[in-house]
């Protein structure tokens, strides 16, 4: 046997080992809903976006029901800049006036949503793009934030414009897809009782959809390795109590806090586990679902 043939055989055996390792996890999650929030570098780099599309198609092919919720902050920012519309952020949320919400909806529900649908289709899957307005999927209300006044220390209500939060997710819209070979791709736009369009944080929408569909996993793809401790080391697993303690003692800060809060709320709402995943790593979704090693920080009810 030549060296090349021997090397090829070793490679084939390695792939077979991977498949056999994945089999118990395929059986465990068969028929279950996996909600994936997709954004950041994973969405912005062609190699990662193509790999993500193939991973989602594979999840569907082996009997899981992936639901993709996507963001699009950088793309929205670029379009607003082109149109000379200034943008302001409060606590990481884009203040959204009437002009901005039109652009947000156009970019999220139009360009980005259809690009993801096209990528999944090119990878051999069948995807349908939705916004939260389609079929009454996401009902929303205006989100308010408060901040203590620096002089009086009295809480001051901040007006974020047409930034919303989900009040109700209609799971019947998504059940149509879980009973078929279609993969839903959802833009985080909601509709208020008064017919107003609201821009909603994609992590928040993903968490709410995970609860409404009884998902076995919620995956939040991020641009860092996962949740890090005070020494900068990856925390591979946390209970809800651990997560709350780390938020209280200052281990977690900045944009990681709302992500962890979303995970905790999802688990308290019945989701099996929530994972903050490094979306910059190839096949991070598959590693998290189909191996014992994972690729980020898992948060679950208890250890």
Image (cartoon, rainbow, N blue to C red):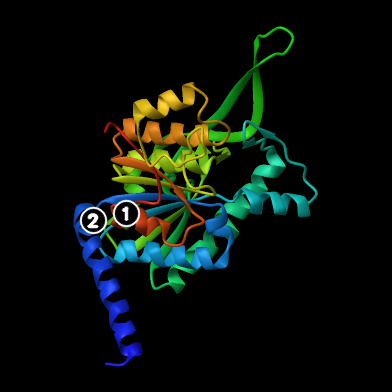
Name the foreground residue: 30 vs 1.
1
Name the foreground residue: 119 vs 106.
119
Residue 12, given in percent of the width and then of the height, sits at 29, 78
Q: Is residue 189 above or below residue 45?
A: above
Residue 214, given in percent of the width and then of the height, sits at 29, 42
Assess whether mark 1 and mark 2 are in contact (beta carbons under 8 angstroms). Answer: yes
Tell me the SS state at disc 1. helix
Looking at the rendering, which quadrant does residue 89 occupy?
top right
Image side of residue 98 versus residue 133, left or right: right
Number of numbered discs overlaid on the protein picture: 2
Q: Which residue appears at 44% of the width and 48% of the height?
A: 277
Residue 206, given in percent of the width and then of the height, sits at 43, 43
Tell me the SS state at disc 2. helix
- Which mark sits nearer the N-terminus, 2 or 1? 2
Reading the image, the residue beneath label 2 is 25
Asked whether residue 137 appears in the rendered view, the answer is yes
Name the foreground residue: 237 vs 207.
237
Q: Which residue appears at 49% of the width and 46% of the height?
A: 133
- Give neighbour class at mark 1: few <14, some 14-19, many 20+ (Cα, 10 Å): many
């Amino acid at each position: 046997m030549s060296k090349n043939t021997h090397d090829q055989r070793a490679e084939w055996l390695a792939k077979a080992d991977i498949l056999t390792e994945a089999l118990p996890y395929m059986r465990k999650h068969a028929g279950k809903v996996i909600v994936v929030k997709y954004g950041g570098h994973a969405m912005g780099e062609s190699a990662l976006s193509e790999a993500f599309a193939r991973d989602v198609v594979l999840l569907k092919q082996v009997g899981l029901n992936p639901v993709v919720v996507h963001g699009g902050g950088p793309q929205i920012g670029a379009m607003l800049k082109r149109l000379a519309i200034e943008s302001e952020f409060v606590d990481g949320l884009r203040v959204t006036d009437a002009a901005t919400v039109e652009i947000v909806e156009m970019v999220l529900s139009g360009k980005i949503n259809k690009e993801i649908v096209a990528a999944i289709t090119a990878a051999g899957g069948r995807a349908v793009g939705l916004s939260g307005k389609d079929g009454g999927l996401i009902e929303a209300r205006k989100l308010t934030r408060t901040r203590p006044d620096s002089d009086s220390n009295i809480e001051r209500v901040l007006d974020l414009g047409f930034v919303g939060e989900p009040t109700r997710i209609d799971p019947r819209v998504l059940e149509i897809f879980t009973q078929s070979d279609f993969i839903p791709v959802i833009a985080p736009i909601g509709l208020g009782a008064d017919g107003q369009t609201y821009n909603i944080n994609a992590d928040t929408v993903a968490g709410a959809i995970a609860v409404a569909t009884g998902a076995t996993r919620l995956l939040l793809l991020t641009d860092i390795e996962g949740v890090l401790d005070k020494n900068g080391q990856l925390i591979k697993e946390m209970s809800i109590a651990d997560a709350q303690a780390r938020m209280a003692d200052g281990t977690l800060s900045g944009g990681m806090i709302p992500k962890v809060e979303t995970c905790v709320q999802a688990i308290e709402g019945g989701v099996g586990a929530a994972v903050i995943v490094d979306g910059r790593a190839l096949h991070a979704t598959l590693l998290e679902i189909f191996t014992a090693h994972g690729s980020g920080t898992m948060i679950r009810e208890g250890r």
